[in-house]
Image (tube, coloured by chain):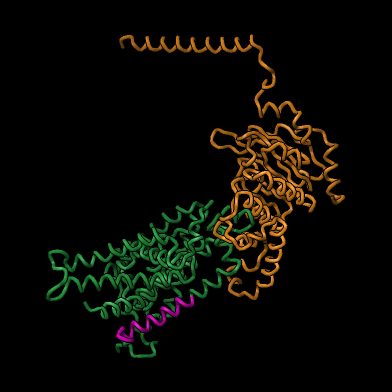
Chain colours: A orange, B green
């Protein structure tokens, strides 16, 4: 592991385990970002920083706002308010493709393999700054052929690394779910990103492939990229995260190294509900039962009362 | 039955000016729908703009043909911008709604009373192709015979120019689609968000595709108007767009030569069924007497037969004639 990456990881260990703690070298900084859908506040994040050159896991129960936060950070959704920046450059006013061009790329929870294009075309699409993507220059193959060859050889290298080289000329639609995840990650790498945001990279991937995907995610860090990922599998989170940010009901409720998170009372409560771990005694069970029966009786009585009221002549 | 006549008439239609017209419209739709995934239901509007641009420029303003063609292209660009600016950021179906409505509006405007001094109202404009005919290297009033397939010199000239244009636009499409530009366009068709996440300005690419395909359609209108020497609103109704889509799907969408093959086959089949039914129902002792099928019913029956044929095609060969079966069988996910 490069010394630089190690230094960035070590720096995290000394930080206090509290929400919104400033990082020594943040790549992405989020400030009071809110997003509401009607009456529901999906995201309400006061302050959070993501350390450069590290793998940060973003976890939380379903509906915690993790994917919405991803959408906001990458320009796929507009917030109600707040600012966020990458390397000090505010991203708030940028559209999704401009964010990607700055080097912040993402993958999607539901994999977006471009089914009717070959695996190689999927990969080559990922390269940025292609001259042949201008409509007029596209008509002059001489102006982009050299670059195209470069892009192709880079795509081939990545396909080999991700063990997709055998599928090179197949339609992406013929790949398995796990292979699509690999392809999507490899495709994102074609743009030579600085920050990679992975939305549930392991979802629906068989265990054998999970190991290889984990290896690839760690590789990204070794190559100096900042990785932020959403994941539900706690083993995966423990295995690869240098830092974990926990969200629940739109808020960041805890952050710290993975070991500290599983001991965090609030996190456990958010996932499992408060008082989940106190075993019920027989007396307590009887009490709960009696309480609910009393509640039902009270409701029934109320209902009958209402019925008799309505029966009175109008 | 006279099989030779049926065949020569069908072949005449298959390569005639009308087939050129549909090939050009479908080439444009191929750019929109086949490659970029844009649902443009207003191709008739683009064709109308092309036809009326040449007609109005030469009859009302006495300007040379070249000016008319340039105006046609500019009009198509403006129309595409008007359609695309508000809708291309929205979901695909909005473009479909706006394009079909805009084409209807254009049609109503050219046939309206207040526009009659310029557009000729429902009568349209005629007799404006002298400049075009004068360019023909042969006598446009002479008739030409190719192994029994007869064309007037004028039709032959329109066909020569038209098919050359088709070849040129096919070459253009081919060049574009093998470039990185075409790759982005296909990616947008597959999944806009994926293209966006990779830093592609989806809006710009969609706009370029809409403009380009619109210009193809307008050039189709130019060629057709010059071939028939009339620009008349009835020829540019929404059914035109749907026939153009039929041609595209018949030939195979997202294939460079699909629209061309589609247009030729579509017109061959239309003329073929028409001629067969005509021979069956007319003459002194028709095979199908009028009690069973009258000649005027037969004329309508051909559309029913062609429609059934297309249904069969979609059931048994959904990818069209030139499409790739594997591609169609791949679901979006």
Q: In this rendered view, identify the residue nearer to me: A88 or A143.
A: A143
Residue A276 coordinates in the image, percent (x, y): 67, 22
Vertically, is B247 above or below A92? below
Vertically, is A276 above or below A25? above
Residue A89 in sight: no
What is the quadrant of the C terminus of chain A in the image?
top left
| In the image, residue B50 lies in the stretch drawn in magenta | no
Q: How many marks?
A: 0
Relative side of A182 to B165, left or right = right
Relative side of A21 to A200, left or right = right
Residue B259 coordinates in the image, percent (x, y): 43, 69
Residue B256 coordinates in the image, percent (x, y): 49, 70
Q: Residue at x 82, y 43 (%)?
A: A9
Residue A39 in sight: yes
Q: Residue at x 69, y 46 (%)?
A: A208
What range is drawn magenta here? Answer: B146-168
| In the image, residue B161 lies in the stretch drawn in magenta | yes
Vertically, is B129 above or below B307? below
Residue B298 coordinates in the image, percent (x, y): 21, 67
Q: In this rendered view, identify the residue nearer to me: A251 or A261.
A: A261
- Indicate the quadrant where residue B1 lies: bottom left
Q: Residue at x 40, y 12 (%)?
A: A306
Q: Residue at x 39, y 58 (%)?
A: B315
- Indicate the quadrant where residue A311 lies: top left
Relative side of B323 to A170, left or right = left
Q: Magenta: predominant secondary structure element?
A: helix
């Amino acid at each position: 592991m490069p010394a630089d990456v190690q230094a960035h990881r070590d720096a995290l260990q000394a930080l206090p385990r509290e929400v919104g703690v400033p990082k020594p070298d943040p790549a992405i900084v989020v400030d009071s970002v809110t997003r509401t859908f009607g009456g529901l506040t999906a995201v309400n994040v006061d302050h959070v920083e993501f350390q450069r050159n590290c793998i940060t896991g973003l976890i939380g129960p379903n509906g915690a706002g993790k994917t919405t936060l991803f959408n906001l950070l990458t320009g796929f959704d507009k917030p109600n308010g707040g600012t966020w920046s990458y390397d000090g450059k505010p991203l708030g006013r940028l559209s999704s493709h401009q964010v990607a061009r700055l080097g912040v790329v993402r993958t999607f929870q539901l994999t977006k393999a471009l089914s009717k294009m070959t695996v190689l075309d999927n990969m080559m699409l990922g390269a940025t700054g292609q001259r042949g993507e201008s409509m007029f220059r596209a008509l002059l193959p001489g102006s982009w052929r050299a670059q195209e060859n470069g892009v192709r050889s880079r795509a081939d290298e990545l396909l080999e690394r991700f063990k997709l080289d055998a599928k090179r000329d197949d339609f992406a639609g013929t790949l398995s779910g796990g292979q699509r995840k690999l392809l999507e990650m490899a495709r994102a790498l074609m743009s030579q990103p600085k920050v990679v945001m992975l939305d549930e990279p392991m979802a629906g991937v068989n265990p054998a492939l999970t190991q290889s995907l984990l290896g690839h995610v760690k590789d990204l860090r070794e190559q100096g990229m900042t990785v932020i990922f959403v994941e539900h599998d706690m083993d995966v989170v423990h295995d690869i995260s240098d830092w974990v940010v926990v969200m629940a009901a739109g808020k960041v409720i805890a952050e710290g190294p993975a070991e500290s998170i599983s001991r965090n009372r609030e996190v456990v409560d958010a996932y499992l509900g408060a008082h989940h771990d106190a075993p019920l005694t027989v007396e307590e069970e009887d009490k709960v039962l009696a309480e609910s029966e009393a509640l039902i009786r009270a409701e029934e009585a109320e209902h009958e009362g209402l019925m008799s009221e309505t029966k009175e002549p109008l | 039955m006279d099989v030779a006549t049926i065949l020569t008439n069908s072949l005449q239609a298959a390569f005639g000016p009308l087939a050129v017209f549909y090939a050009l419209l479908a080439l444009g739709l191929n750019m929109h729908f086949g490659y970029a995934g844009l649902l443009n239901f207003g191709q008739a509007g683009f064709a109308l703009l092309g036809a009326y641009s040449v007609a109005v420029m030469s009859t009302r303003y006495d300007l040379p043909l070249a000016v008319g063609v340039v105006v046609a292209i500019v009009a198509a660009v403006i129309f595409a911008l008007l359609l695309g600016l508000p809708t291309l950021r929205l979901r695909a179906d909005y473009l479909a709604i706006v394009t079909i409505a805009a084409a209807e509006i254009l049609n109503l405007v050219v046939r309206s009373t207040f526009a009659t001094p310029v557009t000729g109202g429902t009568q349209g404009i005629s007799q404006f192709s002298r400049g075009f005919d004068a360019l023909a290297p042969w006598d446009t009033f002479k008739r030409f015979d190719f192994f029994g397939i007869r064309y007037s010199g004028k039709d032959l000239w329109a066909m020569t120019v038209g098919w050359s244009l088709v070849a040129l636009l096919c070459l253009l499409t081919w060049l574009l689609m093998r470039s990185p530009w075409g790759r982005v366009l296909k990616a947008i068709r597959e999944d806009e968000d994926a293209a966006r996440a990779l830093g592609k300005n989806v809006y710009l690419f969609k706009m370029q595709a809409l403009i380009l395909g619109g210009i193809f359609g307008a050039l189709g209108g130019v060629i057709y108007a010059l071939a028939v020497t009339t620009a008349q609103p009835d020829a540019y109704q929404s059914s035109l767009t749907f026939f153009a889509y039929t041609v595209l799907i018949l030939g195979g969408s997202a294939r460079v030569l699909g629209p061309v093959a589609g247009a030729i086959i579509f017109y061959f089949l239309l003329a073929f069924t028409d001629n067969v039914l005509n021979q069956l129902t007319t003459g002194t002792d028709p095979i199908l007497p009028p009690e069973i099928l009258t000649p005027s019913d037969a004329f309508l029956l051909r559309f029913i037969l062609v429609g059934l044929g297309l249904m069969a095609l979609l059931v048994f060969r959904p990818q069209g004639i030139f499409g790739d079966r594997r591609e169609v069988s791949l679901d979006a996910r």
